[in-house]
Image (cartoon, rainbow, N blue to C red):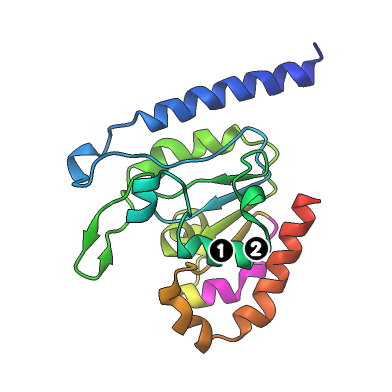
Amino acid sequence: MSLGYKQQFLNNYIMDQLLLKIKNCKECKPYLKDGVHPIIAASSKSKLVIIGQAPGRVVHHTGIPWNDKSGDNLRNWLGIDKPTFYNTDIIALMPMGFCYPGSGKTGDLPPRPECAPLWHNKLLTLMPDAKLILLIGQYAQAYYLGNTIKSSLTETVHHYKSYLPKYFPLPHPSPRNNIWQAKNEWFAQDVLPELKKQINHILN
């Protein structure tokens, strides 16, 4: 058994154990009125990491990340099909909060703040082949971009080139953001073609 193969085998084992720990996590149970159901999909071979906000109600019930209209829009942005999207050897789906946070007065509550500090670095360390991290929405961008983040999500996305080659900030693909896209035509004209180019480069 070669050293490279041994290391990959070890990484696979450690990742499997980590994912099991995450799926059995009860850290936020007192705050989750809809129950604990961590949603995560990753592999030690993942080449692209997608960090979103938190599962919505539909995803909470199905257990399948991005299994909703937002997911359909995101796949269209990336220019990939469902089999590719859900192949963890290609793509890791890692939200800021792993469980559905519940609903508030104006929509879903923010992701629970415990998840990212507790699990993200451990997961990313086990994905040495990851070439790009998509940061979807304000919570992921604030956490990972720190003081390099711009004054608004719009400005951060507009200046996406300054975060490459490691990060690619994006707005949330929720249908609710269709108005934002209509106001910011540069997103479809300039950002999405570059996003597809980056994804195609990673996949090929």
Query: Does residue 170 appear anywhere in the picture?
Result: yes
- Amino acid type, callout 1: Leu
Residue 109 is a magenta residue:
no
Q: Give neighbour class at mark 2: few <14, some 14-19, many 20+ (Cα, 10 Å).
A: some
Q: Secondary structure at mark 2?
A: helix
Pick the front one: 193 or 127: 193
- Amino acid type, callout 2: Leu
Magenta span: chief secondary structure: helix
Pick the front one: 135 or 91: 91
Please determine whether, in this image, residue 111 is positioned above or below residue 154.
above
Left or right: 117 as drawn, with respect to 125? left
Disc 1: which residue = 74
Q: CA distance from mark 2 to mark 1?
A: 6 Å
Q: Secondary structure at mark 1?
A: helix
Contact check, label 2 and label 1, Cβ < 8 Å: yes
The magenta-colored residue range is 155-165
Disc 2: which residue = 78
Query: Does residue 55 appear anywhere in the picture?
Result: no
